[in-house]
Image (tube, grey):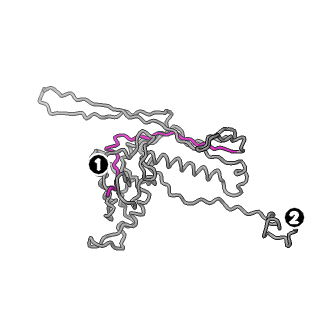
Amino acid sequence: MANQIPLSGLSDAAGGVLLPTEQGDILANGILQQSGALALAGDSRATTSRRTQFPIWMGRPTAEFVGEAGTKPVTGAEFGAGTLNVKKIASIVIFTDEQLEDVQNGDLNVLVDGGVQEAIADVTDAHAVGKDSGTNLSTSFDIAMRSTTSTVEFDGADEEGLRLAVSAAMGTLEANGYNNPANMGVLLAADASRHLRDARAVPGGTVAGNTPLYQPNSDPLYGLDRQFSTNLNTLAEAGGSNKIVGFVVYKPNLHVRIRKDIEVSVSREASVKVAGEDAPRSLWQENLTGLRYETRLGYWIHDINRAVVAITNGS
């Protein structure tokens, strides 16, 4: 081997191998992921059962005027039932043992843990909404918001279109007997905040001006509890069939039951089947560590066609 003159860090052979590269902190790119559907549930609690049955009061007792000593009418009532089934959501992440040993800065476990928990939140949100990034899906829960038959239309050409659509949806809930605004909530597309910020006043009703339509101290959403979801269609995209940009809901009618919070199990000895690979991975033989994430929860909506109003963008 040729001698290196001078010894320097210009090549590994000249001594660069003695100067290991410093590993910077782990960096994460920003990800737009908002999963607010379950957060709007007004009835969310832990459960020890895999199924919850709700009795539903459906009767409308009647009364009549009667004469003195007259026969009094007999009224009836009716009960129905709804069922919430707990479902399992899971994911497995595999590391090489060397990867865990050699990471110098940053906690890779924490970073991955946060990412998997966000993934679980996103998939539960998608199935609660009934859409995955704007595309309809068949929910694994007992019901999805998208199943409602109550709709109002968002007019994207109107600077006040979103505010008016939310008001119209609130009016539908009120007409159905769900008339307490404190119990209402709104789930909107992820770009709704920008849409409201960018709305401009229209002087003379003809040309949009530079004055913001909504001032910082005003609330175009009427003080409603609001959440956002990246699984809804955006307000910026063109209208069309099956385009839903939001929901106005009566929160007490949305039910979540958590059978088991997110639980992490670690193994270095299991065999793991990886999608697309014929043979399972042997964690012990290949010096791998597997982290299995699991949660069990259920989601159900009572009286969905009267308690959930979809804001559609069909124009």
At x 45%, y 35%, the residue is 85
Tell me whether the residue at label 1 lies in contact with that at label 2, contact meaning CB atoms closer than 8 angstroms.
Answer: no
Is 15 in front, or is 220?
15
Where does residue 104 sit, x and y in percent of width and height? 71, 57
Looking at the rendered structure, the kind of residue marked 2 is Met
Residue at x 73%, y 63% (from the top left corner):
22
Question: Closer to the camera: disc 1 or disc 2?
Answer: 2
In the image, what residue occupies the spot 71% across and 44% down?
Answer: 286
Label 1 sits on residue = 174
Badge 2: few (under 14), some or many (20 or more) residues near its Cα, within 10 Å?
few
CA gap, disc 1 and disc 2: 86 Å
Q: Residue at x 69, y 45 (%)?
A: 288
Residue placed furthest toward the left: 67
Tag 1's secondary structure? Answer: helix
Quadrant of the snapshot with the C terminus: bottom left
Q: Which of 208 and 220 lies nearest the eye of the viewer?
A: 208
Q: Is residue 53 left or right of residue 75?
A: right
Q: Which residues are magenta?
A: 288-315
Q: Earlier in the sequence, mark 1 or mark 2?
A: 2
Which mark identifies residue 1? 2
Residue 226 x/y as whole percent? 41, 54
Indicate whether residue 71 is drawn in magenta. no
Local SS, label 2: loop
